[in-house]
Amino acid sequence: MKNQMQEILDAYHQLAPLPLEKTIPRIAREQPELRDAVLGVLNNHAAKRLLGGTVETVAKIEHRLIQGPEDKIAVRIYRPDHDDETKPVLLYFHGGGFVIGNLNSYDSSCRALCNAADCVVVSVAYRQAPENKFPAARDDAFTAYNWLISRSRELGVDPRRIAVAGESAGGNLAALVCLLAKARGLPQPVHQLLIYPWVDSEMDTHSFREHGHAEPLNAEMVSWFMRYYLPDGIKAADPFAFPMQNDDLAGLAPATVITAEIDPLCTQGELYAEKLRAHGVPVFVRRFEGVAHEFFGMGALVPEAREAVKLAAENLQAAFDGLPFNEDSARERREELANLQMQMRT
């Protein structure tokens, strides 16, 4: 494991969190988060002076409540600048196994994507289990997508340039938004960004066997999350609960799939990318070596996180600009950008 990633995990241990899989959801939500460990390491490094602050700044943040299927849904809106230009927008879903996590937990990811992709980011506080089991989170996610389309003018965003993204359980929701949009006759997002997505209930995979005892996510935790998420009588093979179980993938939005080497979810994310590709969906997939689940929002400390955000932002910008997308074109655009940056430095 990369030194920076290990340092964060060591700092997390010092916060003495209880093992989530040994607790109940109410107690689990009170435990320290990896975000706390990142901030602690930054402070220990005097990062406020060296890095210009522990939190990446954006031009504006606002909060709204939108009407959900049963109650109001809180959303947080990040804007990259103050001008009146109509911007593309990224609908983002946080992780946490559908049980824990919140808007604050994944704030750094949203800030980074807002700036790097030069787009508005709308982060959704969907309902969580066990108080609200499946399909509550999925239905809130799709409601937010509908709301974004219908209120785009009011929000100052372009309804023709909406992408979806999510980390872990949020990657599941982003993928399901695309599937539900197809099933219900709504326009597809221009892109789906799936970051170490939890897209399958199947745990008999290479990465579960190889990294089932990894940190910060292990196989026992995944089982714990699933136990609280799925209600009695709902099978884990439901094609609108776990996208890997769905065989009607043709015509979905082009996808960027980012995985982490030291993560039990690594294999299933890559298998879902292969399944999308087999159904004719343009896909770019990249595994980041030496890092673990949750690394994406750690750009202040982990170089691989900065690289992952850069890659994601480039693919999002290409989608927002209407450029053709496939693995070769994405690679060529990055090479062109790297050459341009090198020329500017010489």
Image (cartoon, rainbow, N blue to C red):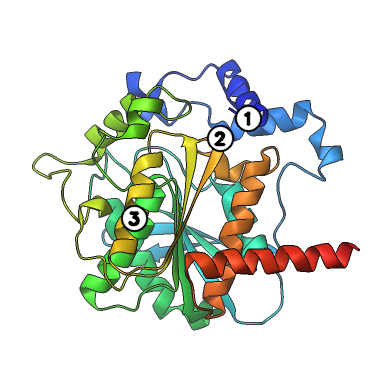
- Provide the residue designation for mark 3: 274
Relative side of 311 to 154, left or right: right
Q: Position of residue 119 (x, y in %)?
A: 60, 69
Relative side of 240 to 4, left or right: left
- Provide the residue designation for mark 1: 2
Residue at x 67% of width, y 33% of height: 39
Of pointers 2 and 1, the one earlier in the residue sequence: 1
Position of 83 relative to 67 (above/below): below
Q: Where is residue 196 in the image (x, y as percent from the top left)?
A: 44, 45
Count neighbours of disc 1 (C-alpha within 10 A) and say few if under 14, some if 14 to 19, many if 20 or more.
few
Q: How far apart are marks 2 and 3 (CA)?
A: 22 Å
Image quadrant where residue 198 sits? top left
Mark 2 against mark 3, which lies toward the viewer? 3
Residue at x 23% of width, y 48% of height: 134
Q: Distance between the residues labelled 2 and 1?
A: 6 Å
Contact (Cβ within 8 Å) of mark 2 with mark 1: yes
Indicate the secondary structure of the residue bearing disc 3.
helix
Q: Which of 118 and 195 is in front in this view?
A: 195
Q: Which amino acid does label 2 sit on?
A: Val
Q: Which residue lies furthest to the left in this view?
A: 233
Indicate the secondary structure of the residue bearing disc 1.
loop
Q: Position of residue 110 (x, y in %)?
A: 57, 55
